[in-house]
Amino acid sequence: EVQLLESGGGLVQPGGSLRLSCAASGFTFSDYAMSWVRQTPGKGLEWISTIFYIATKTSYADSVRGRFTVSRDNSKNTLFLQMNSLRAEDTAIYFCAKFRSTTGWTTSDSWGQGTLVTVSS
Amino acid sequence: DIQMTQSPSTLSASVGDRVTITCRASQYISSWLAWYQQKPGKAPKLLIYEASSLETGVPSRFSGSGSGTEFALTISSLQPDDFATYYCQQYNSFPWTFGQGTKVEVK
């Protein structure tokens, strides 16, 4: 059974940093691209970033490019999101999600339960 | 960015009703469209991918249709477990974008 468990969320001041982790199990983590998606009551679901199984290939939303960095440690089956220069509008629940398949173009199927990030002074 | 527009925003229905939610993309996305179901406090659950392919384990009362810019999710006979919020998502190109959601509530 696929399991994705996010951690690292919490309260941080504007301008601060936070590192989210997503521990994966139940599938061959190194074979799958992974994504981060966040959700707020006001803006709904927002895709943040994707990292492919070749970790040098990444993509980011304009709203976070230059401030957030996605990475992965395939030896530890873990996905990361380093968030710097945090703003109030980054307040959201952050989900990690895996690609549905290892071949071809696809979307995310399994998602974690999410971790809450609150940016406030 | 590709904008995804869902309608309606809220849908009131009864158990056994046939329900259809529509999603329009602001530009051509072929069949690179997914539908998710989300319940309060839970992660989104993939129902449909590539516009009309049913995800494994999803009941056959759910179906997807459309291509290009116009898409629909249909629930053939609404069940108690189906009251939730539904989102469409395009994955034709980055940035992936989602519709604003359709809440299916009890009539």
Image (cartoon, rainbow, N blue to C red):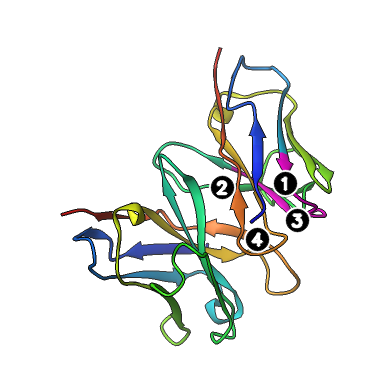
**The magenta segment:** B24-36
The foreground one among A88 and A27 is A88
User: What's under tag 2, amino acid-wise?
Assistant: Lys
Along the horizontal axis of the image, is A14 left or right of B100?
left
Q: Tag 2, which secondary structure?
A: strand
Q: Which residue is mark 4?
A: A107
User: What's under tag 1, amino acid-wise?
Assistant: Ser
Indicate the position of residue A1 as horizontal and vertical percent values. Answer: 52, 62
Characterize the local packing of mark 1: few (<14), some (14-19) or many (20 or more) Cα atoms within 10 angstroms: some
The foreground one among A73 and A28 is A73
Q: Is residue A22 above or below residue A118?
A: below
Of badges 2 and 1, nearer the viewer stands: 1
Q: Which residue is mark 2?
A: B45
Quadrant in the picture for residue B100: top right
User: What's under tag 4, amino acid-wise?
Assistant: Thr
Characterize the local packing of mark 3: few (<14), some (14-19) or many (20 or more) Cα atoms within 10 angstroms: many
Subunit bearing disc 4? A
Q: Which residue is mark 1?
A: B26
